Image (cartoon, rainbow, N blue to C red):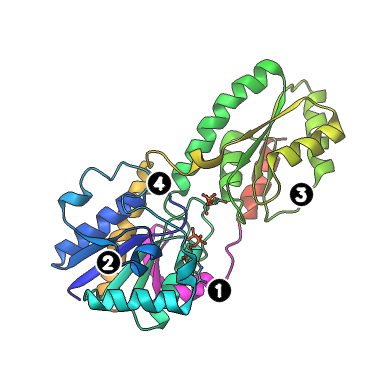
């Protein structure tokens, strides 16, 4: 291969820039040209791209977001959209593509690969919901953002002796809620992977109250219900004064942690190696601290399940 391209797609995540930098610099190291596609699959359809140099990815390793921008592109879900993208890529003599994104973006990557265009995925999403990899780029930063916010809310919860519900992101996945809950000693954690037992949650609150605990933190993943719904439910059972904080998109931005920068650098570089080795239709992954490649199809075939032993541990420790 002489020319490859990289794009970021779906929800942005901290560390995507570090991954772009690694792709570009590892590509240049191997003597190939690297193009950056703007706005994910939208840029493929519109042939909106630029050639990236060593300098164009300088000073971005520490920045959240993505210098290539990202988008959700309905047109790319259609055969016409994909064919237009392929025709644009071939006209420009681009021979391989690296897609940094979540599972939706990987379905698009697999579609291109199935049509004969070598494509490799790099998991970039705060949700940590991709099968085949222990971690995705951005997850560690998002969890740190959440625990920083909860540490602040804890002060107010304690001063006012209130119960706080913190709604965190995670459409179908509870990892952000579970990790933040364990890291912050939350009283209860609500995740889509485990049944919600409102009476048990209320019982725990009352039990804590009886032994003198006057404030509590409950973390709810948005995939379970909204923070407001959780508040109504808990207030109706316990009668406790409850407040809700929805952390929202602050979880997606910000300076990536060292863990995310290192993960992104390792994964981005590996994606170039995988593409150049002709192993297309793969996703780079981390397992037991080893960076490897797994088939995209396999990663997409199964829904990643949360490690419920961590969930159980959080409950035991919050007794
Ligand atoms: P994420 O990658 O964060 O999961 P989305 O699910 O929104 O984000 O997907 C990002 C983009 O990937 C979509 O806007 C669309 O362009 C593309 N995409 C998603 N699913 C498919 C699919 N089944 N076939 C082709 N492209 C897809
Ligand atoms: O997939 C990442 C994610 O942040 C989810 O946790 C969240 O539900 C979703 O994206 C929000 O998407 P949007 O930015 O389009 O509202």
Q: Is residue 87 visible?
A: yes
Label 4: element kind: loop
**Distance Cα–Cα, label 1 vs label 4:** 26 Å
Label 3: element kind: loop
At a point 54% along the width and 58% down the height, the residue shown is 129
Q: Earlier in the sequence, mark 2 or mark 4?
A: 2
Coordinates of residue 52 in the picture (x, y in percent): 20, 58
**Distance Cα–Cα, label 2 vs label 4:** 20 Å
Circle 4 packing at 10 Å, graded few (<14), some (14-19), many (20+), is many
At a point 80% along the width and 47% down the height, the residue shown is 197
Do the residues bearing badges 2 and 4 touch, measured as CB atoms within 8 Å?
no
Q: Quadrant of residue 242?
A: top right
Residue labelled with disc 3:
196
Q: Quadrant of residue 71?
A: bottom left
- The single residue placed furthest to the left in the displayed view is 31
**Distance Cα–Cα, label 2 vs label 3:** 44 Å
Please tell me whether residue 71 is drawn above or below residue 114 in the rendered image: above
Q: Is residue 280 visible?
A: no
Nearer mark to the viewer, of 1 and 4: 4
Say which of 313 and 172 sits in front: 172
Q: Residue 5 shows which numbered tag?
A: 2
**Residue range corresponding to the magenta coloring:** 280-305
Residue labelled with disc 4:
14
């Amino acid at each position: 291969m002489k020319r490859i391209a990289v794009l970021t797609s779906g929800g942005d995540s901290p560390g995507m820039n570090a991954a772009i930098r690694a792709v570009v610099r590892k590509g240049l190291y191997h003597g190939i040209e690297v193009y950056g596609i703007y706005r994910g699959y939208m840029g493929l359809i519109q042939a909106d791209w630029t050639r990236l140099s060593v300098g164009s990815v300088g000073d971005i390793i520490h920045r959240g977001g993505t210098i290539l921008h990202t988008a959700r592109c309905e047109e790319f879900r259609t055969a016409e959209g994909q064919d237009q993208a392929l025709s644009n890529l071939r006209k420009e003599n681009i021979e391989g593509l690296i897609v940094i994104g979540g599972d939706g973006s990987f379905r698009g990557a697999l579609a291109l690969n199935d049509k004969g265009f070598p494509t490799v995925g790099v998991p970039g999403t705060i949700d940590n919901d991709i099968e085949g990899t222990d971690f995705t780029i951005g997850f560690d930063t998002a969890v740190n953002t959440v625990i920083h916010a909860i540490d602040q809310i804890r002060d107010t919860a304690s001063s006012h002796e209130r119960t706080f519900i913190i709604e965190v992101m995670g459409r179908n996945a509870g990892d952000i809620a579970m990790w933040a809950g364990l890291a912050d000693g939350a009283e209860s954690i609500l995740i889509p992977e485990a049944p919600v037992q409102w009476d048990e949650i209320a019982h725990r609150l009352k039990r804590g109250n009886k032994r003198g605990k006057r404030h509590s933190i409950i973390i709810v993943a948005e995939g379970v219900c909204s923070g407001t719904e959780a508040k109504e439910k808990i207030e109706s059972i316990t009668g406790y004064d409850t407040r809700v904080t929805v952390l929202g998109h602050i979880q997606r931005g910000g300076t990536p942690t060292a863990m995310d920068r290192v993960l992104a650098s390792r994964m981005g570089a590996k994606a170039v190696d995988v593409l150049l080795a002709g192993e297309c239709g793969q996703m780079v992954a981390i397992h037991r601290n080893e960076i490897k490649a797994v088939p995209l199809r396999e990663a997409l075939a199964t829904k990643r399940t949360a490690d419920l032993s961590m969930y159980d541990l959080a409950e035991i420790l919050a007794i």
